[in-house]
Image (cartoon, rainbow, N blue to C red):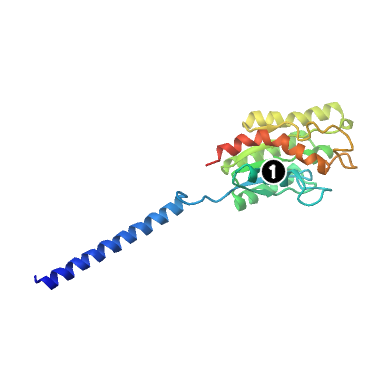
Amino acid sequence: MNKTHASLARGLQARRRAFTHLLLQGALAGLLTLTGTGAQAAPRNLLILGDSISAEYGLPRDSGWVRLLAERLKTSAYDYNVINASISGDTTIGGRGRLPDLLRQHKPAIVIIELGGNDGLRGLDPRAMEDNLGAMISAASRSGARVLLVGMRLPPNYGRDYNSRFEAVYPALAARLKVPLVRFLFEGLGQTDEFFQADRIHPTVRSQALLLDNVWPVLKPLLRQGKT
């Protein structure tokens, strides 16, 4: 082989090595993107399945505790999208029917279930409420989500026996299905005009930060579990 041919061969080999190096770099970059390593991971979804208490009934838009939660997550450097799937007047049977589609659509990392109050106000059987809540907790857990259950109580005029059976549903479910529980969303509000609207059921704007403060200590450990 003369010098010209040898030089051409060395040049071809150098170009082949450079091309191979570029291919390897591209493959590695693609792998890092797929695994999330070396790139910012997409925010996780936090789904709230609730009734009018979480749907801002009677409140100015974006003033409810769910909105305050989204703001606190952001300022606390927790990377979650808050999806509020709450509907005024919803019951546990309604939530149970809506949840499967919500899980498929949003694939949440955390699900907060704030339902049952309308079951109680309508005098529905607490055993049916327990069955519906249990089904929702199980479905969310099977999807891979961490679940937080939010408890409620009823006004005293519903009677001691019914109120006791209603209230007992939440801690019993939380213990049986091993999920964290906010025992009473309205804890600390009392029954003053300052904290409740004229219907004596729905909290005022001033109450919303207190509602969040009742949820936050129970929710925070679930956030840490998913924090990278």
- Horizontal side of residue 221 vs 29, given as left or right: right
Q: Image point 18% across, 71% down: which residue?
A: 8
x and y percent of residue 159 in the render?
Answer: 87, 29
Is residue 130 visible to us here? no
Q: Quadrant for the N terminus, please.
A: bottom left
Q: Quadrant of residue 147?
A: top right
Is residue 172 visible to us here? yes
Kind of residue at disc 1: Leu
Q: Quick check: 101 above or below 160? A: below
x and y percent of residue 228 in the render?
Answer: 52, 42
Q: Say which residue label 1 marks.
A: 69
- Horizontal side of residue 122 vs 40, given as left or right: right
x and y percent of residue 94 in the render?
Answer: 74, 46
Q: Image point 76% across, 49% down: which residue?
A: 87
- Horizontal side of residue 202 vs 112, given as left or right: right
Camera-side residue: 157 or 59? 59
Camera-side residue: 62 or 115? 62
Q: Residues within 10 Å of mark 1 (few under 14, many from 20)?
A: some
